[in-house]
């Protein structure tokens, strides 16, 4: 069994999912971590390996790949991880805080490591 790099947190966040073919529909997230999320896909639109764009509670787009399916649920892996601050705001249902933290993260210069 694989271990997760970051813990999943329950959330009531909602948003939208856009497929590579341009289809857009509303989603509800069941849980969220820095590296991905689980969403309900009752209509079975998502296929393993497919790339999608998520718009979550006023943030995004978050590019993600469908990693797994189980019945009506699909697990997505973000191409760019979310910060722990953004995830914490989502878990607390603090949508404004999540949006502000996400925007701050976008304006920060990338960290470069010198070896």
Image: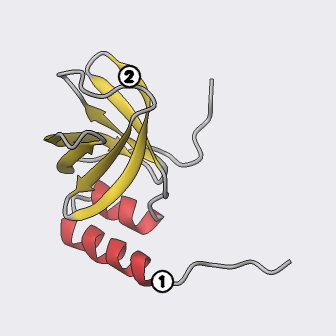
Residue 2 image position (x, y, % from top left): 62, 29
Q: Is residue 70 above or below residue 96?
A: above
**Residue extending furthest top?**
71
Report whether 5 appears left or right of 78.
right
Residue 115 located left or right of residue 91: right
Above or below residue 74? Residue 64 is: below
Q: How is the image coloured?
A: secondary structure
Where residue 72 appears, x then y in whole percent? Answer: 25, 20
Image coords of residue 92 (percent x, y): 27, 59
Tell me the SS state at disc 1. Answer: loop
Assess disc 2: are there few (<14), some (14-19) or many (≥20) residues with their C-alpha within 10 Å of its C-alpha: some
Q: Which mark is residue 108?
A: 1
Q: Closer to the camera, 100 or 23?
A: 23
> In the rendering, which numbered label is found on residue 80?
none
Counting from the top left corner in percent of width and height, residue 86 is at 37, 65
Q: Is residue 94 above or below residue 105?
A: above
The structure residue drawn at horizontal position 48% and vertical position 83%, both measured from the top left corner, is: 108
Q: State left or right for residue 59 relative to residue 23.
A: right
> Which sits earlier in the primary sequence, circle 1 or circle 2?
2
Q: Who's the residue at 44% across and 60% down the image?
A: 82
Circle 2: element type: strand
What residue lies at 37% left-to-right and 61% top-to-bottom? 88
- Dividing the picture into quadrants, the one containing residue 18 is top left
Q: Residues within 10 Å of mark 1 (few under 14, many from 20)?
A: few
- The quadrant in which the C terminus is found is bottom right
Q: Residue at x 42, y 76 (%)?
A: 105
Q: Quadrant of the N terminus?
A: top right
Residue closer to the observer: 53 or 36: 53
Kindly indicate the quadrant of the structure image that contains residue 101.
bottom left
**28 up-or-down from 15: above or below:** above
Q: CA distance from mark 1 to mark 2?
A: 34 Å
Residue corresponding to mark 2: 69
């Amino acid at each position: 069994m694989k271990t997760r790099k970051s813990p999943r947190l329950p959330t009531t966040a909602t948003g939208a999912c856009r497929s590579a073919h341009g289809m857009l529909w509303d989603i509800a997230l069941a849980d969220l971590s820095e590296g991905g999320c689980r969403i309900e896909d009752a209509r079975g639109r998502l296929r393993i390996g497919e790339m999608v764009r998520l718009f979550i509670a006023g943030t995004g787009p978050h590019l993600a790949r469908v990693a797994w399916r189980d019945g009506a649920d699909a697990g997505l892996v973000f191409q760019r991880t979310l910060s722990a601050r953004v995830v914490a705001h989502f878990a607390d249902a603090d949508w404004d805080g999540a949006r502000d933290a996400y925007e701050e993260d976008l304006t920060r210069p990338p960290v470069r490591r010198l070896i």
